[in-house]
Structure formats: structure tokens, C-alpha cells
Amino acid sequence: MATLSDDTLRKILVQIQQTAIQSQRALNISVQQTTAKERERRILQLTIDEIGGMKGDVNLYKGVGKMFMHVPRDVMEEDLKKQEKELTDDINSLNKKSKYLEKQFNDAQNQLRDIFHHAPKQ
């Protein structure tokens, strides 16, 4: 079995460490984004529930910039449900990304552990 030079081994270790660090940072960002999107989705769900509980003749207004525009109930409900679906899709995508990043981080840690475990004792 060929032995690696100290310089080559050091480069490999640095690369694995960088992969682990980048994966951990990206995972943290992904978790934060998921939390924010879940909060947004919950607010939308509450808004949809509130609108659903109102009488049919209530005027609904949507914020547009610094003003509010009258919006028909069915259009408002459709927009809110569309936004909720988009947020759900985003959350699912972020969860998949988080799982991938977590696996990448764990793989890098395992590689480091294996290298140090099998390294000759000095």
C-alpha cells in the first residue's frame, strides 16, 4: 500500500474539513429558511381560516404598496391558497436540501474519524 506524503494528507484533511464546515453552514441556513417559511405558511393558514369564517358579503382588501385594493372573496382565497402551496413546495424542497446537507456533513465527519482512527500512532 502506498503511503501519502504529509503535504498530500494535509491537503486532503483540509478539503474534508472545509466540506464539513460548508455543509454545516448551509444546513443552518436551510433550517432557518425552513423555519421562516413555516411561520409564513402558518400565518397564511390562519388568514384563510379567518376569511372562511366570515360572511359572504364582507369586503376584503389586499395591500398593494402603500394602499389597499378591494378584492373579490374568491380571488383573495385563490391567491392565499396559491401562496400557501408555493410555501409548502418551498418547505419540502428545503427539507430535501437539509437532508442532503446533513448527510454530506456526516460523511465528511466519518471520513475524518476514519482517517484519524487508522492513522499510525506516533
Image: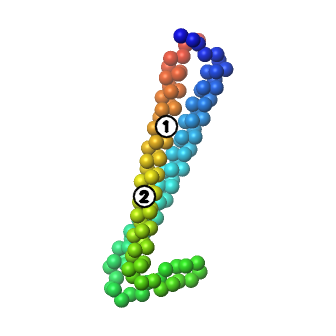
State the SS at label 2. helix
Q: Quadrant of residue 82?
A: bottom left
* The C terminus, quarter of image: top right
Label 2 sits on residue: 89
Question: Which of pointers 1 and 2 indicates the residue nearer the eye?
Answer: 2
- Mark 1 Cα-neighbour bin, 10 Å: few <14, some 14–19, many ≥20: some
Q: Position of residue 58 (x, y in %)?
A: 38, 87
Instruction: Residue at 51% x, 32% y: name it.
Output: 108
Q: Amino acid at mark 2?
A: Asp
State the SS at label 1. helix
- Mark 2 Cα-neighbour bin, 10 Å: few <14, some 14–19, many ≥20: few
Q: Is residue 113 left or right of residue 46?
A: right
Q: Position of residue 5 (x, y in %)?
A: 64, 16
Label 1 sits on residue: 104
Q: Quadrant of residue 20?
A: top right
Mark earlier in primary sequence (1, 2): 2
Q: Is residue 5 left or right of residue 76?
A: right
Q: Position of residue 4 (x, y in %)?
A: 61, 16
Against 14, is 97 above or below?
Answer: below
Instruction: Residue at 44% x, 56% y: name it.
Output: 91
Distance of label 1 from label 2 (alpha carbons): 23 Å
Q: Is residue 61 left or right of residue 16?
A: left
Looking at this view, is 17 or 81 the one in front?
81
Instruction: Residue at 65% x, 17% y: name it.
Output: 6
Against 8, is 101 above or below?
Answer: below
Count of all numbered marks drawn on residues in the image: 2
Q: Quadrant of residue 78?
A: bottom left
Q: Amino acid at mark 1?
A: Gln
- For residue 44, the mark is none
